[in-house]
Amino acid sequence: MESVKDELVFIKSLMKGVSALFGKNCEVVLHDLKDQPYETTIIAIENGHVTGRTVGDCGTNLGLEVLRGTDASGDRYNYATQTKSGHVLRSSSIYLKNANGEVIGSLCINFDVTDMMFAQEVINSVCMNPLVAQDSDSNEVFANDVNELMDTLIQESQQQVNKPVPFMTKDDKLKALRYLDLKGAFLIKKSGDKIAKYYDISKYTMYSYLEEIRAE
């Protein structure tokens, strides 16, 4: 396959199947990273309302990193992201390559789990499983790269609060940052940039919060 358009009929059929299986909260996007300028890479999309994108829109920063060669790992599975409106997504990005191993496109799946997070909070409040509660801090994460590890730690920190970032109070963000600090997340190089951006606060505010946490 030298161009994603060579298999467009099959890929579109696959996209419809995936979106139909997981429902309206599952967005499936096809990017043409060879024949389209980066400003208009999206050539097919199902359930675009999840991120508010349509055919003709641009790719993401992750795609740029792959094309630039900054991100040599390429495919990423089941990582945490969020929309501009604060909805929490679980995402996977699969990069399509030609016979020479050059990236020519990507197939991305974004599943909105915001409603599930609220439902989980209600369920946990009425029927908490004591075994899960006892063992939750002993889970070991076997990540292949530090970005994957950071994504996991950030999602776990948000689960401590169980609400989307736009609805968090200062106390909620302090609770999330306290968890990340205890887990050693700030020992990872440049983790502060990622954490501050995810929680929609400046780095100055984040480190001010950290001082407050560590002074307790």
Image (spheres, rainbow, N blue to C red):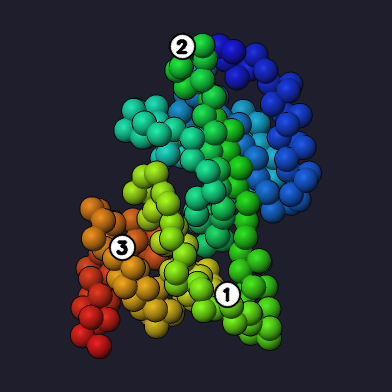
Percent of width and height locating residue 157:
43, 69
Find residue 149 and report its horizontal and vertical position in percent. 39, 53
User: Which mark is on residue 206?
Assistant: none
Q: Amino acid at mark 2?
A: Asn
Spatial CA distance of label 3 from label 1 is 23 Å
- The secondary element bearing badge 2 is classed as loop
Specify the label residue 100 is tagged with.
Answer: 2
Looking at the figure, which quarter contains the C terminus? bottom left
Helix, strand or loop under label 3: helix
- Toward which corner of the image does residue 204 lie, by quadrant? bottom left
Crowding at mark 3 (Cα within 10 Å: few <14, some 14-19, many 20+): some
Q: Residues within 10 Å of mark 2 (few under 14, many from 20)?
A: few
Answer with mark 3 or mark 1, whichever residue precedes in sequence: 1
Residue occupied by mark 3:
185
Q: Amino acid at mark 1?
A: Val
Position of 104 relative to 136 (above/below):
above
Q: Nearer the viewer, mark 3 or mark 1?
A: 1
Residue at image location 38% in from the left, 64% down from the top: 200
Disc on res. 132: 1
Report how far apart the C-alphas of labels 2 and 1 lie in the structure.
47 Å
Which percent across, then down, holds residue 54?
A: 62, 39
Tell me which label, 2 or 3, sits earlier in the chain: 2
Can see residue 188? yes
Q: Residue at x 59, y 78 (%)?
A: 131
Identified by mark 3, the residue type is: Ala
Toward which corner of the image does residue 138 lie, by quadrant? Answer: bottom left
**Quarter of the image holding residue 42?**
top right
The one nearer the camera, 173 or 84, is 173
Q: Are marks 2 and 1 in contact (CB under 8 Å)?
A: no
Which residue is rendered at x = 44% and y = 33% of the image?
Answer: 74
